Amino acid sequence: MPSDFKVIIVGGGPIGLLAAHALQLAGIDFVVLEQRPRIVEDQGASIIVWPHTLRVMHQLGILEDLLSMGDELKRHLSFTKEGYAFSVGDRWERTHQNHGYWPVAFHRAELIEVLYNTLPPDAKEKVFTSKGLVDIEADEAGVRATCIDGSFYKGSLVIGADGVHSKTRSQMRKLALEADTQRDWDPEEPYLSTYRLLFGSFPSPCQPNFGYDTHSQDKSISFFSGEKRGWFFLYEKLPSPTQERVKYTEDDIQAVAKEFSDFALTQTVKVKDVWSQMCGYGMTTLQEGILGHWTFGRVVLIGDSCHKFTTHIGLGFNNGVQDVVVLFNALRKAVHQSSSGIPGYLTLIKALQTHEESRKDHKFHLYYLIS
């Protein structure tokens, strides 16, 4: 199908855009297909970025742009729901001493905006919106991704960076089971939810650079304070675990907010004190799990599409960044070692398998881009 090596990235969120940066740096052609009508939308809450991820951002040449938008986290307290501080932690001070940076909190939309705006002009032209994926066709020659508007894109590889409800994952599963109906594969809804989450942002009610957590039976809160915004995450245990996808209504959201209204965010601020000032909020079940299969043929998954963590101090995003690094180091090696710049099918499959095996290794590793 393709005349040269080209990567189709499905998903224009933080991990998809970071993948675009990595491909641009590696000199590998790509397109990004995002189902939403705009790349930057003021949705979501905060993303915590850790020092090893900041080092990757430095390698990509975008660290200073990012740091100008973020808020360092320097002090940690743990509360009871009544506001009693039972633990004063120095975890972030030790992080700074050992790794040179504090953890940094970003408003998710602003992080996406920086990742998009720092792409070179010719790379931005490869990022397309309103391109919901509906089908993937693949063979040993290449792949073809078809979108809901009827358009299609041909390439050498599809990367699914499209999140917990990944369309790429569904299409990869379809291809695998079409090839062998008896194949053991992950279920259509692979993740289990034990908690639900109400998240949101609001004008910061206290000094910046704080990260608090509040604990109670079956309920807890994470709160981060920035210069302009504060962000909270209200966690509530479900009556029973579920793998079903749940869509919450405004009434559901208001009911949970009322349950948490007297919970402490800080020693002087409660949830009810900020609820009337919300800039935005949403509610979702908190899926958790790791897929058994991250790749099939010319399709590979990264980020939440293949492993899902609860929203605990940035585990999802920072692990997704590690996926990008490991995958693109393997791809860059395969491309550069090919005399034509187009890796053979078996070489490509080996690179994708190397990525999956490296990331599933039970030993702890931190990876960086190979220049």
Image: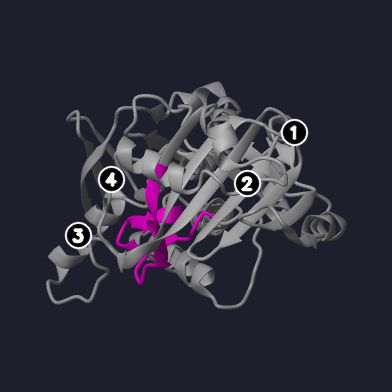
The residues bearing labels 3 and 2 have C-alpha atoms spaced at a distance of: 42 Å
Identified by mark 3, the residue type is Leu
Q: What stretch is highlighted in magenta?
A: 283-311
**Among the two numbered marks 1 and 3 on one chain, the one whose residue lies closer to the N terminus:** 1
The residues bearing labels 1 and 3 have C-alpha atoms spaced at a distance of: 42 Å
Identified by mark 1, the residue type is Glu
Whether residue 14 is visible to the viewer of this picture, yes or no, is yes
**Among the two numbered marks 1 and 4 on one chain, the one whose residue lies closer to the N terminus:** 1
Identified by mark 2, the residue type is Phe
Q: Residues within 10 Å of mark 3 (few under 14, many from 20)?
A: some
Of badges 1 and 3, the one in the foreground is 1
- Say which element carries label 2: strand
Identified by mark 4, the residue type is Lys
Of badges 1 and 2, the one in the foreground is 2
Q: Residues within 10 Å of mark 2 (few under 14, many from 20)?
A: many
Q: Residues within 10 Å of mark 1 (few under 14, many from 20)?
A: few
Q: Does the magenta stretch include residue 293?
A: yes
CB atoms of marks 4 and 3 within 8 Å: no
Q: In this view, does 238 lie above or below 261?
A: below
At 17% from the left and 30% from the top, the residue drawn is 150
**Among the two numbered marks 1 and 2 on one chain, the one whose residue lies closer to the N terminus:** 1
Q: Residue 247 carries which label?
A: 4
Q: In this view, does 315 lie above or below 261?
A: below
In the picture, residue 129 is in which quadrant?
top left
Whether residue 10 is visible to the viewer of this picture, yes or no, is no
- Residue at image mark 1: 64
CB atoms of marks 3 and 2 within 8 Å: no
- Residue at image mark 2: 223
Q: Is residue 225 above or below residue 142?
A: above
